[in-house]
Image (cartoon, coloured by chain):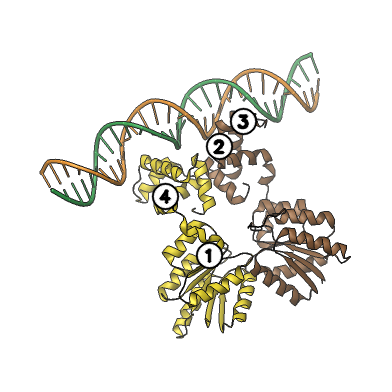
Chain colours: A yellow, B brown, C orange, D green
Amino acid sequence: MFTKVLIAEDFDSINIALIQTLENMGVKEIEHAKYCDDALLKAKKAIQDKAPFDLLISDLSFETDYRTVSLTSGEELIAAIRKIQPEIPVLVYTVEDKTFVIKSLIEDVKINAFVHKGRNSISQLKTAMETILFGGTFISQNVAHALKEKSFNEIEDYDVEILSHLAKGVTIEEMEQLFKLKDIKPNSKSYIEKRVSKLKDIFKAKTTIHLISLSKDLGII
Amino acid sequence: MFTKVLIAEDFDSINIALIQTLENMGVKEIEHAKYCDDALLKAKKAIQDKAPFDLLISDLSFETDYRTVSLTSGEELIAAIRKIQPEIPVLVYTVEDKTFVIKSLIEDVKINAFVHKGRNSISQLKTAMETILFGGTFISQNVAHALKEKSFNEIEDYDVEILSHLAKGVTIEEMEQLFKLKDIKPNSKSYIEKRVSKLKDIFKAKTTIHLISLSKDLGII
DNA sequence: TATTCATTTACGGATTTCCGTACGGAATTA
DNA sequence: TAATTCCGTACGGAAATCCGTAAATGAATA
C-alpha cells in the first residue's frame, strides 16, 4: 500500500472522509491541503526532506475565497507537482463529469485514476489505489464512456477562445479587433464567422446562443 | 442537542463525515439515505414508530443513476417531509450558491439553516444546529448576501420561458409562433424582443448570448 | 521561379436582431 | 365620460449575423 499520501481537497467534509478511509487502509502518513498552493508547498517540502509523497489525491475545482492564490485548479496543481516530481501517481477525486475534461485528463495529463464522487465513490477510491499500485489506470464506470467521445478532438484552443468571448458578450466584430490587438491569428471577421459556423455544425446547434448554451453544459467554457 | 437526525445526501464521502461529526456532537440516533425516496420512507416509518426525527439535514442535488426515483431533489424531499411532519427543522447542506435558490429556500420554503459546503463547513454545521436549537435561523456567511439580492424579484416565469427557449436554439421569430401555438401571451415578436432587452438591462448583459451565459451561471435556466 | 494546394481574407446580399417610435385597447382615475 | 396610464402590438431603420463566392496570401513542391 502507499505509505505517504497528499490530499488536495477544499471541502472539509470530504477531507474528513478521505483521511478516515486512508487510515483504515493502513496509509501511514496522510497530509491534506485545502488550497492548491499549500499542497504544492507540502510536496516541495517532502522532496527536500527526502521523503516525497508516493501518491497525490486531488480534487479539480477549488472554491475561491478571500485568499489570493496562484494555483486555482486541480489541473494546475497536478502540472506544478509533476514538474518537481514527474513520476508521482495521481488520483483525481471529483464531481466533474464532463467528457471533455475527463478525456483530456486521462489522455493528455496522463493521470493514473479518475474517481467520480458519488454514492459509492469511496469503494471505488480503494479499488483505484490498488489498481495504481499494480501499474494500471482506473476510471469510474459511470464516466468511462468519456474516453470514447469523438467530436472533441476537432476543437482547438482557438475555438475555446472564440466561445468564451462570445459568452462574455463580445461580438464577432469586436473580436476581430481584439484578436488583432492580442496578435491572435486568424483574426478576420469572416474567418471567425466561419469557425463559429463550423462549431455549430459539430455541436448540432441551431443558433449561436444555442452553441454557447451547449458549450457551457459540456464544460468547454 | 438533537437526538434523532435524518441525513439525505448522495455522496458517500460526505455521509461519512456527517455521521462522524454528529456522533462527536453526541447525537444518539443517526440515519442516512442516499436517495430522497429512501429518506422519505425513513421519515414516515419514524412517525409510525412514534419516534419521529427531530432534524433533517439534506443536500439539494442528487445524482441520477440507474434507479428510478420519484423525488429527485432536496427541495422536493423537504416539501414531502414537511407534508407529513410540518414542524421538523430543516438544515440544508449543499454546494449550491445561487442567490436565486438560497433566497427562495429561506424566504419561501422557510428552512431553518443553510450551510454552504466548503473549507469550514463542518464547524458551520455545528453552529447552525445550535442556532436551530435556540429557534434561530442560520445562513453561511459567504452566501448571506443572497438575501439582499433585489433583481430576481423582477423576473417572472415568462422570462424564464423566453430564456430557456433561447438557450435551446429557438429564435425570437420562432418563439412568436410557438407562443401562439401554446397559447402563451403576450406573444408578439416585438414584445418578446422588448422583454429580452429588459432582461439584458437587469443582468447588465452586453449581448443576448451574454445574457444566456449569465442566466446559466446564475442557475435560472 | 513557377505551380499547386490549403489557409485566410474580402466582399455582398439575405436574414435576424436591435432599438426607438408610434398606435390601439384595456384598466384606472377624476 | 374624458383623461391618464399601462400593456401589448406594429413598423422601420441601423446594426449584426449568416452564408456563399471570390480573391489574396503563404507554404510546399517541382
- Give whichever of B180, A188 is nearer the camera: B180
- Give whichever of A110, C29 is nearer the camera: A110
Q: Are marks 2 and 1 on the same chain?
A: no
* Disc 2 to disc 1, C-alpha distance: 34 Å
Residue highlighted by disc 1:
A60
Residue highlighted by disc 2:
B170
Residue highlighted by disc 3:
B191
Q: Are marks 3 and 4 on the same chain?
A: no
The image shows residue A194, relative to residue B61, as above or below, that is above
**Amino acid under disc 1:** Leu
**Sequence order check, earlier mark of 1 and 4:** 1
What percent of the width, then of the height, locates residue C24? 67, 18
* Disc 4 to disc 2, C-alpha distance: 23 Å
The image shows residue B196, relative to residue B59, as above or below, that is above
Q: Are marks 3 and 2 on the same chain?
A: yes
Q: Using a 10 Å C-alpha cutoff, classify the residue at mark 2 as few (fewer than 14 neighbours), some (14 to 19) or many (20 or more).
A: some
Residue highlighted by disc 4:
A159
* Disc 3 to disc 4, C-alpha distance: 34 Å
Chain to which mark 1 belongs: A
Q: Residue at x 82, y 60 (%)?
A: B44
The image shows residue B62, relative to residue D25, as above or below, that is below
**Amino acid under disc 2:** Val
As drawn, is A46 to the left or to the right of D27? right
